[in-house]
Amino acid sequence: MIKADVTSLLSPFSLGSVHLRNRVFVPGHTTNFGHANNPTDRHVAYHGERAKGGVGLIITEGIRVHPTSAGRHISLGSFDDDSIPAYAAVAEAVQAHGTKLFAQLLHTGRQANGDATRTAAWSPGTTPWAAGTHIPHAMGPTDIAIVVQAFGAAARRMQQAGYDGVEIHLGHGHLIEQFLSPFSNTRTDAYGGSLDGRLRFTREVLAAVQEQAPDLPMGIRVSTDEFLPGGLTPPDMVEIVDLLRQEFPLLYVHASHAAYHGSYSLGTQMADMSFGHAQFRHHAALFKKEIPGLPVLAVCRLDSLPEAAELVTAGEADLVGLARPHIADPYLVRRAEEGRAHEVRSCLACNQGCVGRLEANLPISCVVNPEVGAEREWARVRSTGTAPTRRVLVVGGGPSGMEAALASCRAGHEVTLAEAGRELGGQVTTAASVPGRERLGLMIADLTRELADSDVTIRLGEKVTSADVLPGGRLDGFDDVVVATGARPTKRELPGGPPVLDVEETVEALTAGGSEPLRGTVLVRDDQGTWTAASLAEALAREGAQVHILSPTASFAAKITTYSKLALTKRLGELGIRAHVMRDVDGAEGTTLVLRDTLSGHTEELTGITAVVDVALPVADDGIYRELDAREGAPRVHVVGDANAPRTALEAVYEGRLAGTFLTDAVSGAELLARTV
């Protein structure tokens, strides 16, 4: 039975002549699945899976209309008619399941990184998008005409490929917004100055699209607020959209926010778990209020269908977009329709497998859904039936062990999961207890629920040794042992100096209400560059401590994606946290620490330190694996997650699923997966 709180989303809705089966859409988001700037079979399978999952509308990731916007070969573009068949294949896969497909067209402008293509980025002027980035080429009249024509030609190709509509991207600080915004457009010719001048490029683009693809319905995506001094504000965008709808048959306005700029603005674009649910919903509501009759699409941190339904029920939006939740679980809508919403794997808004990997020029993945980008291969694995049943013991109940146990059970094996502690979850449960990181706990809750619904035997409080599983041991009889025992934190004591706490000790103190040394002046010593140090520093500062954070490298929080880091650094700055990069601790006496410059070797003193939180490199807790691997007659042993090598939950869940499914090591499992097609 459909829950009442999502009924409003599951009813049909029409965008003009485009009839949708429900009000849920997947907004455009970069996947890095492309090849030579064209869609691939990975796109076909990825979008086809989400269409099969029941969503009403899918909007593609940004399709670059000109090579100066390509940036990389793995991005999508449509530069000539040879691209039409590849786009048609995606359309056929999506529409076969009753879902409509719109193509998002854009030119990224000044942030197009030309390193891969050796092209200059194009922009209204020569100001880079961030310090230290490429200086763009200031477009002349000929350049502008080329891009306008390119938008029209790309739209025509999408029409020929059978798409149901097109979305022109006017937001996110891309080229069209760069012309619209007084922050980035300082031109004095006909394309700058007054609003009419700054609108000229947009009008020419929309006219070209309408002329070359007259049968293709057209919507626009905008940034309602640039969050930049002197940039576009919500009243500005209402005026702009209202002017454009009077001149063009706009199907809808897709209300997003932010500009691609090296500041807090970019940190809001793909808001992570530090932001609240639907924190930017007022943008969509503004358009609904100010421009009656124009359908409004809402987006960003709509974490679940019930939460997204709030906007439709309140009359703040007509359609709601869930990108990252559909990465986490392609079957969001179908599960709700079938009364199985409780089976959904929750999006954590961690920005780790999606945003973090795309920033590294890697295909996106997902912490809670390791099948992203390999939907076709995993479907083939499930269709080939199960292997001969084996008895499998999984040692360790963190995310890697939980995933391994589930995967092995689903592959048809008899599985026991043994966890030494009193609860499942491992280090993720610890991390989720840190203020601001609570959404991590959703992963453990989902895995725990799935295990409870499975045939896996769970033994809590059971410490397993290698002797236990050897012939004659108390757990003799297992064919395979998956070691998922995680990693241990380490710390470097400072004799004669302030007390030193490792990560687990710090979290325990925080959750217990803090300790006196942690209420004073605390140094967070960060050798990892991950969220561990950053979240502890923020939590301590919010508890009233004066916090210093130290990194031996030249980069603060090097492993956190820029999208999250720009918002993080704003918060840390407001809390008065001080950063010391290219520094390490060289000694201590009392409350004074000696810091060494890792470049020059010069030293300086930091006084008044009451405690040091040492986020040192963890050590794999792999003793059982080492012992079994070296013993003849032992069961087959596999090691996954941090017990294999300390990394993140992304790798832990991925390795757990591979090991549990194929009962082999992660490398061999990945090769077996690839060979299924």
Image (spheres, helix red, strand yellow):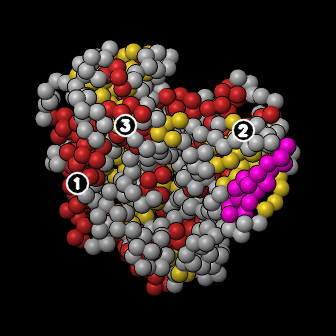
In magenta stretch: residue 582:
yes
Secondary structure state at the residue bearing disc 3: helix
Q: Is residue 457 above or below residue 510?
A: above
Q: CA distance from mark 2 to mark 3?
A: 30 Å
> What is the quadrant of residue 598 in the picture?
bottom right
Q: Which mark is residue 500?
A: 2
Range of magenta residues = 575-598
Check disc 1: other Cα within 10 Å, few if <14, some if 14-19, many if 20+.
some
First-in-chain label (2 vs 1): 1
Coordinates of residue 61 in the picture (x, y in percent): 39, 55
Coordinates of residue 185 in the picture (x, y in percent): 62, 72
Task: Using residue 242 as the reference point, say whether residue 416 is left or right of it.
Answer: left
In magenta stretch: residue 314:
no
Q: CA distance from mark 1 to mark 3?
A: 40 Å
Q: Which mark is residue 626?
A: 3
Quarter of the rendering occupied by the N terminus: top left
Secondary structure state at the residue bearing disc 1: helix
Coordinates of residue 355 in the picture (x, y in percent): 47, 51
Q: Which mark is residue 654?
A: none
Dominant secondary-structure state across the stretch colored magenta:
strand
Q: Is residue 282 above or below residue 168?
A: above
Q: For marks 2 and 3, give the one nearer the viewer.
A: 3
Secondary structure state at the residue bearing disc 2: strand
Residue 147 in view in this figure: no
Q: CA distance from mark 2 to mark 1?
A: 52 Å
First-in-chain label (2 vs 3): 2
Q: Residue at x 32, y 57 (%)?
A: 33
Residue 143 in view in this figure: yes
Q: Residue at x 42, y 70 (%)?
A: 71
Residue type at numbered disc 1: Asp
Residue underneath mark 1: 41
Q: Residue at x 27, y 73 (%)?
A: 80
